[in-house]
Amino acid sequence: MANETVVLRFSDVSFEYNEMKPILDGASFSVRKGSKVALMGQNGAGKTSLFKLILGEFKQKSGSISLTPNSAKIGIAKQVIAPQDLDMTVRDWFANTFATVPYNLDKQIAEALDAVNLVTDIEKKVREHSGGQQARLLLAYALIQNPDVLLLDEPTNNLDQEGIEHLTGFLMVHDTTVIVISHDADFLNAFTDAVLYLDVHTHTVEQYAGNYSDVVEEISERIDRERMQNARAEAIIRKKKEQAEVFAHKGGKLRSVAKRMRESAEDAEENMVDVRREDKTIREFCIPSQQFEFDFSGKIIEIQKISSMQYGERKIQEADIVLRQEYHVLLAGANGTGKSTFLRDIVAGQAEGAVIADGVRVGYYSQDFSVLDFKKTAYEILQEVMEKNDEHILRSTAAGFLLDAKALASTVRYLSEGQKGLLCFARLVLMCPGLLILDEPTNHINFRHLPIIAQALDTYHGAMILVSHIPEFVSRIRIDTTIDLNPS
């Protein structure tokens, strides 16, 4: 339960990467001790940058950021584990948290892992854990610091339903101050009591009381009121201008009346409410499937063996699954059952008993965006998958996914995680694959986009293998077969 003590305050803070990319412009807000706050904003608005300002990793251009007390500790569960840390053991990775490694490190690690419901060998390398297990490690990494303020950046990404429920329960009972970035509306509604909205257009932060749904409704009602107010004002302004024109043409003393009426209309225009532009949603789209001009049996991929992890051991099970055009498969299983590994092996041609037909283009959406070269620009990423270079088609497709000229000119490493996800979908559209392999394609994506993405996958005419832990998303997509990797 929040109290009246303010633990974090932004006062008139401005920050920008450069003149072309402002993030905050005079932003002010405060966070009370013990509150559970959702940080919202459109993809690319700068939510993760705001976290880095709180951590001191970024320095504001002006204004002040204060903690009460000054010694308050900030802990963060980031979206992903840094690539350079993946080959460390779990024990060494946690040891990096401390300036001086405590004598009881193993005990503290055990307590942190228990809090996130993860059982693992601390001598195991970080990269040997699944995406969902790494998500739990990230949370445990933050908790072991015993923070006064806990920052969570998309904590439900890669978590199965059990993991999401455990995290939700943990946040509901813990009295730590929490600020969370998430596009999972149900998750946010379960425990948040306030919302900070980072407006990508004004670069300010709006502060609201209530959970996510309360705030969305409040914003919607406010926008409706402001639009009605402006509509009435526009009618009055139009009438004053028309009357001013009439009086101006009559000459004499009426010209001064016309001048006053024009000035009155100009004042009314300046006083019109600046209606907040609501988050944009991506355009409806389809992923064209590859047109097979060569002679083949119709089998796009044949799976005769399935590899999974069960109780810490690799298991191979026999299968007889043939994917042809219009055939959609859901690969299901809890965190740690080897779904991502199986998909990566299929794409790399290293999965025993899984054979992709010659000439089939594979469109792979990896949960860690490993299909993207982070050193290239978004434009180059899209250009390299096109059979014929067409500037208009490339930019039009990108615009449909809210990737404007600035985003296209940016190297991938500087895009937000949400923008990287949308870039992956734009890439699939331009690629025209015969086989789609999608590993958690909802990660980092604004929930407003999910029904549109689901519709595109539902109507995809090629073969598809999908992994997703979001039941509502999956329910919108036609699934012909489910492969369950959970232990029987």
Image: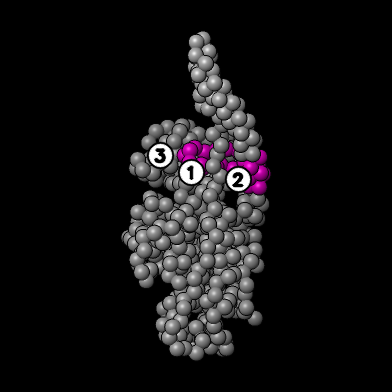
Question: Pointer 1: what residue?
Answer: 200
Q: Which residue is tagged 2? A: 36
The quadrant of the picture occupied by the C terminus is: bottom right
Quadrant hosting residue 482: bottom right
- Amino acid under disc 1: Val
Image spot of residue 368 (x, y percent): 45, 64
Give the CA distance from mark 2 to mark 1: 22 Å
In primary-sequence order, the first of circles 2 and 1 is 2
Q: Where does the image place residue 268, in percent across and percent down from the top left?
A: 55, 24
On the image, the x and y values in percent for residue 355 come to 47, 86
Q: Is residue 326 above or below residue 53?
A: below
Instruction: Determine which quarter of the picture holds residue 35.
Output: top right
- Viewer-nearest of labels 2 and 1? 1
Alpha carbon separation for disc pair 2 and 3: 25 Å
Q: Is residue 394 left or right of residue 475?
A: left
Please provide percent x and percent y for residue 374: 36, 61
Is residue 196 part of the magenta span, yes or no? yes
Q: Secondary structure at mark 2?
A: strand
Q: Vertical placement of 228 versus 188: above or below?
A: above
The label shown at residue 15 is: 3
For the residues carrying marks 1 and 3, which lies nearer the camera in this image?
A: 1
Q: Amino acid at mark 2?
A: Lys
Q: Magenta stretch: give its range.
A: 192-221
Q: Is residue 261 above or below residue 432?
A: above
Q: Amino acid at mark 3?
A: Phe
Q: Earlier in the sequence, mark 1 or mark 3?
A: 3
| The N terminus sits in image quarter | top right
Discs 2/3, front: 3
